[in-house]
Amino acid sequence: MAASRTGLTPHLRFRSKVLSRDRKAGITNCPECGTPLDYITTRLPNSAEPDHIIPITKGGTNDPANGRTICRRCNQSRGNRDKPRKRKTPPEVTASPIW
């Protein structure tokens, strides 16, 4: 199993710069799903997280230009892919008329 790179200085700088830039720019909702972002609390489904547009393993860098802020849920579902997984949406519940 590979060691986590998220605790290393280059990633921490990337994280700080991307989150700071996007918070100052007024990004308040996840561009993927629209949920309101929480920049204060970490490890919640709606916590703001930096995302590498091009993953490091696919040639991306820790340059803030390769980053954007999305919610934790979208970031985790995206994983190491260029695009997020399609979420299965539950079928809409429609009320049937009562005769």
Image (spheres, rainbow, N blue to C red):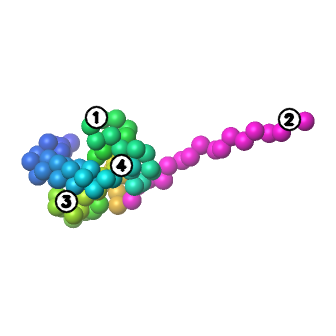
Nearer to me, 76 or 64: 64
Instruction: List the residue tagged with mark 3.
Output: 64
Residue type pointed to by label 3: Pro
In primary-sequence order, the first of circles 2 and 1 is 1
Which segment is the magenta one? 83-99
Between the C-alphas of marks 3 and 1, the distance is 22 Å
Residues at marks 4 and 2, CA–CA distance in whole angstroms:
42 Å
Residue 90 in sight in this render: yes
Q: CA distance from mark 4 to mark 3?
A: 18 Å
**Residue 32: % across, % down:** 42, 54
Q: Is residue 88 left or right of residue 52?
A: right
Query: Which residue does the image show at 59% across and 43% down from the upper left?
Result: 90
The front one of 36 and 78 is 36
Q: Which mark is residue 28?
A: 4
Q: Main secondary structure of the magenta part?
A: loop
Say which residue appears at 24% left-offset and 53% top-offset: 24
Q: Is residue 18 visible?
A: no
Q: Which mark is residue 98?
A: 2
Mark closer to the observer (4, 2): 4
Disc 2 to disc 3, how far (Cα)? 57 Å
